[in-house]
Image (cartoon, grey):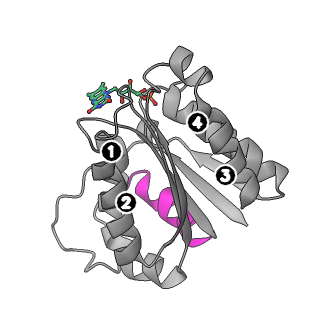
Amino acid sequence: MKIIVLEGSPHKNGSSNMLAGQFIKGAEDAGHTVSILDVAHMDMHPCMGCGHCGMNGECVYTDGNASIRDALLGADMVVFVTPIYYFGMSAQLKMVIDRFYSYTIKLSAKGLKSALITASWDSDADVMPYTAEHYKKLCKYMNFTNCGMVLGTGCGSPEMTKDSVHMQEAYNFGKSL
Ligand SMILES: Cc1cc2nc3c(=O)[nH]c(=O)nc-3n(C[C@H](O)[C@H](O)[C@H](O)COP(=O)(O)O)c2cc1C
């Protein structure tokens, strides 16, 4: 499979990207081809809802969105990677998802496989369900098949993440694909 990993953290070497790195190792060990898009550091604008694209056309912005679109339309799987910010995904990742608008019809027609990888400081059960539910609803709407989630609670810093059970979990998940 061709897998595109969308990394949505401002921390290039942060916790969510560490978990994504383990996932990628596992997926590559299983023979898949993985490409990382560090979308948090790409030139991106938030969707302004102008409707020019009609959900199936050119966006008025000429920024990183076109390369994300082309990568996803040529892929078999998308992996969303994000730190937890106030019980949701980062604005950087959400901006990419909102910009799906101009190619929603094409993207949903592909029937991609998908996964979610998150990192939060807190380790209690109440930190992840909001992001997980949002992701699951997005999968339904976009016709993605959810292959799984690594919900990295207690991964508040690289030091915490390094010793977390979620590192192995992320590797195993990638390897299982
Ligand atoms: C703006 C902001 C909001 C945050 N909100 C939460 C939160 O709601 N719950 C939580 O457990 N951690 C929260 N955190 C902590 C991060 O999720 C945590 O440090 C995570 O490891 C960062 O991942 P990263 O290194 O991949 O960016 C927040 C951090 C920031 C900067």
Q: Are marks 4 and 3 in contact (CB under 8 Å)?
A: no
What amino acid type is highlighted by mark number 1?
A: Met
Residue assigned mark 1: 89
Local packing at callout 1 (Cα closer than 10 Å; few below 14, some 14-19, many 20+) is many
Residue assigned mark 3: 173
Local packing at callout 2 (Cα closer than 10 Å; few below 14, some 14-19, many 20+) is many
The residues bearing labels 2 and 3 have C-alpha atoms spaced at a distance of 17 Å
The answer to whether residue 58 is visible is no
Query: Which circle marks residue 107 in the picture?
Result: none
Instruction: Say if disc 4 is inside 8 Å of ligand 1.
Output: no
> Disc 1 on helix, strand or loop?
loop
In the picture, measured across the screen, residue 75 lies left or right of residue 130, that is right
Q: Nearer the viewer, residue 151 or 58?
A: 151
Q: Nearer the viewer, mark 4 or mark 2?
A: 4
Q: Residue 162 placed where, x, y %? A: 61, 21
Residue assigned mark 4: 166
What is the span of residues highlighted in magenta in the rendered image? 62-74
The residues bearing labels 2 and 1 have C-alpha atoms spaced at a distance of 9 Å
Residue visible at 71% across and 62% down in the picture: 177
What amino acid type is highlighted by mark number 2?
A: Tyr
In the picture, measured across the screen, residue 153 lies left or right of residue 78, that is left
Q: Nearer the viewer, mark 1 or mark 4?
A: 4
When the figure is inspected, residue 153 is found, relative to residue 171, above or below; the finding is above
* 130 within the magenta span: no
- Choose top left, top right, bottom left or bottom right for residue 108: bottom left
What amino acid type is highlighted by mark number 3?
A: Phe
Local packing at callout 3 (Cα closer than 10 Å; few below 14, some 14-19, many 20+) is many
In the picture, measured across the screen, residue 158 lies left or right of residue 122, that is right
The residues bearing labels 3 and 1 have C-alpha atoms spaced at a distance of 21 Å
